[in-house]
Amino acid sequence: MTAMDTKTLAGEIKAIANTEDNRRTRLINVVRKVQLSYGHVSQEMVGMIAEALGIERVEVEGVVSFYHFLSGKPVGRFPVYLNTSAVSEMMGMSEVADAFEKAAGIRFGETSGDGLFSLQYTSCIGMNDQEPAALVGGVPFTSLTAERATEIITALKSGNTPAELVEKYGYGDGNNANELVRSMVNNNLRKRGDILFGERENGAAIRKAVAMTPDEVITEVKTSKLRGRGGAGFPTGMKWDFCRRAESEKHFVFCNADEGEPGTFTNRVMLTEIPDLVFEGMTVAGYAIGSHKGILYLREEYIYLLEYLEDVLEKRRQAGLLGKAVAGRKGFDFDIRIQPGAGAYICGEESALINSSEGKRGEPRDRPPFPVVSGYMGHPTLVNNVETLAAAARVIEQGGEWFASYGSGESSGTKLLSISGDCQKPGVYELPMGMTVRVALQVVGAQDAAAVQVGGPSGTFIGEEHFDRKICYDDLGTGGAMMVFGPRRDILETVLNFARFFEDESCGWCVPCRVGTGLMHAKIKKIMAGNGTRTDLEEMESWGRSIAAASRCGLGQSAANPELTTLANFRKVYEERIKEDEYLTGFDLERAVEDACEATGRTAIHE
Amino acid sequence: MAKPRIATTSLAGCFGCHMSVLDIDERILKLAELVDFDKSPINDIKRFSADCAVGLIEGGCCNDENVEILRAFRKRCKVLVAVGECALMGGLPAMRNGVPLKECLREAYLDGPSVVDGLIPADAELPLLLDQVYPCNEVVKIDYYLPGCPPSADLIWEALVALLTGNDADLPYELIKYD
Ligand SMILES: Cc1cc2nc3c(=O)[nH]c(=O)nc-3n(C[C@H](O)[C@H](O)[C@H](O)COP(=O)(O)O)c2cc1C
Ligand code: SF4
Ligand code: SF4
């Protein structure tokens, strides 16, 4: 680069930083914009960003290296991110990958010489009901085939844009065809329940809320027995109460739309079809806890919805449902901003989500203090899932008793399930809490299911004998994911996929998780290669328990679930693969020296 | 009756574990009464002269020579003990496992800031590096593990005596506590 070029670049980067008010806390936004403009964040740019924001280089480097969609090396003008979820693999991902490689003339992990394409794999992008799916130039392409993949690359080479291609393939159902979305993604919303998808009027919940005291609002939520839909199932009313009572000059409401658990895609459909209800929930929560600011954390994979969501927010401002004196209530000012993520499953963990929103690496914090006491910028912060907030708005609108009349026992209301895999009607279903797996399978047309995975990789794998178990907090919990496996599927393939997922997504902070996920992955590979023994199974069980017990956050605590639940429920699958030897090495000397031979031009001579 | 034989080796280790063996101080005389040393850097005997009762392994495997020695130890020793973090887990040398071997070589011999006229060593005499550093138990079966970096002389002593005499090892908490 000439001195002149460097100066121009520095000026441009300064201008980008300026669009974010040169705020350190907006580092992710700045880096994202640089990535979008230049296809990477080079060492030189790292320095320029650091200077513009008045921070250390290492902070910028830390962020660039942390998130999947940020890169120190140039990606293509049309980066391809192919989804590697288990269901994507089942639906023919590898043929699609081959086609992409052939058409682009490069391997995965590479960028083409003309700078047009780069090929990369990425964890689940929330499209399990229309796999294989990929993001190409930031645009989702769904239900890919090998022919489609070839066609996409050829068309982009000859000057078409991803948007033109999507138009040609046809927009998806519902608001996916909205002029601000224009996406080929489908909602596949196959069952609308009374609660989330029932008839409603915009602003009704807010108007009702501001006519009550905040304490009354919280009491109503408690009456509904609503619990968190994001996975942990914490009672929502109680969480709001804790946050309200934590003293501070500011409080914050976060809506968690990171939705990274493979197989989960309910939040995507809600944000496409009922974003108003979600924002309404955030606003009601803001009123209840005494907050003026809400933040929707939107995963990068769903960024194609950004413009549309911004527009929804703008319309709500115009309708007096956001901004100063919301719904005419003096003193209640509330607005919402959207914080884009940059690709990291761990950012769904609430304290990691907060770190990420402060412009840091998305590493979890030590808890306590919990976010309700000390969260965003050290202030009390309420983090709720998209579905929780939407449900809360309905609770206020229709009453806690009404809500509690749905569902069963301690699991009130309905639950959105995103069901995928070997079934006739994959998609999103709003079903009452507490229904059995068998009923759900009937609804989606999966009568011959041999295995079901509830809750994604961090959830539970069950077989036929458990199909009468209930989907609810007391039995099989789920953030929405349910994957169905037919009788001919190899369960270990899926366990392998999940093991790789956890190894990739571990943030690396603590040893049990960082090392443990690698060890579990290696064990599964060893067993699948035919080198497993009974000792390997015993070690997996014992190490799995240690990883769960010693890890710092929920990711590590559930990272061994794929192995532990399949060892418990599908032991036969393992028994068939292992050998009765006392010890078997998985080590292959010839393979282990291949790289060294290549690097030195030598040949290995071993007895 | 012939004394039991013992062999030791340092693979991808720093010799710190062997130093710890020597740290048993005057007990080394007692050890000499108990056993005969076979192949070991301590006496500089390079080849096995007979089958051994116990083999102590320091370090993991970072090259093909390490693998061959470890396999020979497995063949010749009735009981194999992995001694120290490197043998148990790969230890410090395994820090390179996160970086592909070719990148490591490039950085060390071609692109590193202090390299002049770089060249990746390719002499046929040199062992071939493995793609990763492997802990011993991934290559052969290991019977016992002595953790530590290095394990203390007392831990090594207690474990050895127990193995050689067939008595239970007396391993108080302090000996296997590491923080
Ligand atoms: C690794 C990990 C990923 C998570 N991902 C999400 C997510 O994508 N969405 C979500 O709502 N909660 C996620 N959670 C749970 C959040 O930490 C938090 O419990 C939740 O957002 C609280 O909202 P709720 O009470 O409404 O469920 C995740 C937790 C962990 C440990
Ligand atoms: S458990 Fe895993 S993801 Fe969580 S803090 Fe530790 S290393 Fe990071
Ligand atoms: S365990 Fe420690 S003392 Fe022993 S060889 Fe490895 S680094 Fe050296």
Image (spheres, grey):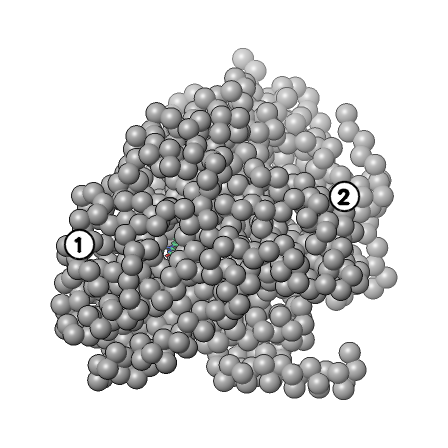
Quadrant of residue B116 in the image?
bottom right
Task: State the image quarter where residue A220 is shown.
Answer: bottom left
Q: Is residue A4 above or below residue A131?
A: below
Residue A242: x %, y % from top left: 21, 65
Q: Quadrant for the N terminus of chain A, please.
A: bottom right
**Is B124 in front, or is A585?**
A585
Distance between the alpha carbons at the discs numbered 1 and 2? 68 Å
Q: Rate crowding at label 1 as few (under 14), some (14 to 19) or many (20 or more) other CA atoms within 10 Å.
A: some
Considering only vertical position in the picture, is A563 above or below A131?
A: above
Q: Amino acid at mark 2?
A: Ala
Q: Mark 1 highlights which residue?
A: A402
Q: Amino acid at mark 1?
A: Trp
Name the secondary structure under disc 2. helix
Q: Chain of mark 1?
A: A
Q: Position of residue A31 (x, y in %)?
A: 57, 72
- For residue A596, which numbered disc appears in the image? 2
> Which is more N-terminal, label 2 or label 1?
1
- Is A581 left or right of A456, judged from the image as shown? right
